[in-house]
Each structure stands twice: as C-alpha cells, then as structure tokens.
Image (cartoon, grey):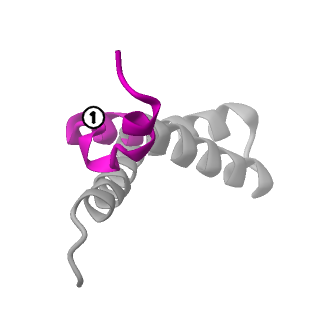
Amino acid sequence: MADERTLATADASTAPRKSAAKTVLIGTVLGAVFVGGLCGMFAVIAGAGTAAAVGVGAFTALFGGPGFGGMVAFTVYEARNNPHEF
C-alpha cells in the first residue's frame, strides 16, 4: 500500500499526458462549433434570414472550424508539453 507522503510528493512528470491526436481532435470539434456559431450569429446580426445564417454557419464550421481549432489546440499542447523558449 502506498504511503501518503509518497503520493503527495509525486511530481507531475509521472502523470499520464493526453496524446497530441486526442488534443487536436477535441480542438477540431470545438473549433467547428465555435466558428460555425460565431459566423452564423454574425449573419443574423447583419440581417440575413434564418436559413441563410444556418447555411453560413454550417459552411464555415465545416471548412474553417477544423483548421482553426486543430491548429490552436496543437499549439497549446506543444507549448504546455515542450517548455522551449521561442
């Protein structure tokens, strides 16, 4: 049985890390939802009809969201896991 002092002093480097692929996949989904919702909302604010706003949101979610979300997620992953100075 593990000693409480051993558990309290274990450093973070022994903890399992998320894989880069899992991080990018989560970022891709979140980016699609964020970009699609944001562009659809802007279309409504600009005066577009509901169907047009949904179309604009879906288009940007499919073509812009995954790239944006994946790049941001991988950049954050690398910055947290590789402490190099830039």
Placement of 38 over or under 51, stated as above or below: below
Element class at badge 1: loop
Query: Position of 76 compared to 44: left or right?
Result: left
Residues 23 and 67: in front is 23
Based on the displayed image, in which of its 4 quarters is residue 19 positioned? top left
Identified by mark 1, the residue type is: Pro
Q: Residue furthest bottom?
A: 86
Question: Dot 1, how many residues are within 10 Å of its Cα: few (below 14), some (14-19), or many (20+)?
Answer: few
Query: Position of 26 compared to 19: left or right?
Result: right
Name the residue rendered at 34%, 43% in the picture.
10
Residues 42 and 15: in front is 15
- Image coordinates of residue 16 in percent, x first then y, are 27, 34
Placement of 73 over or under 32, stated as above or below: below
- According to the picture, the residue beneath numbered tag 1 turns out to be 16
Q: Which residues are magenta?
A: 1-27
Q: Quadrant of the C terminus?
A: bottom left
Q: Number of marks in the image?
A: 1
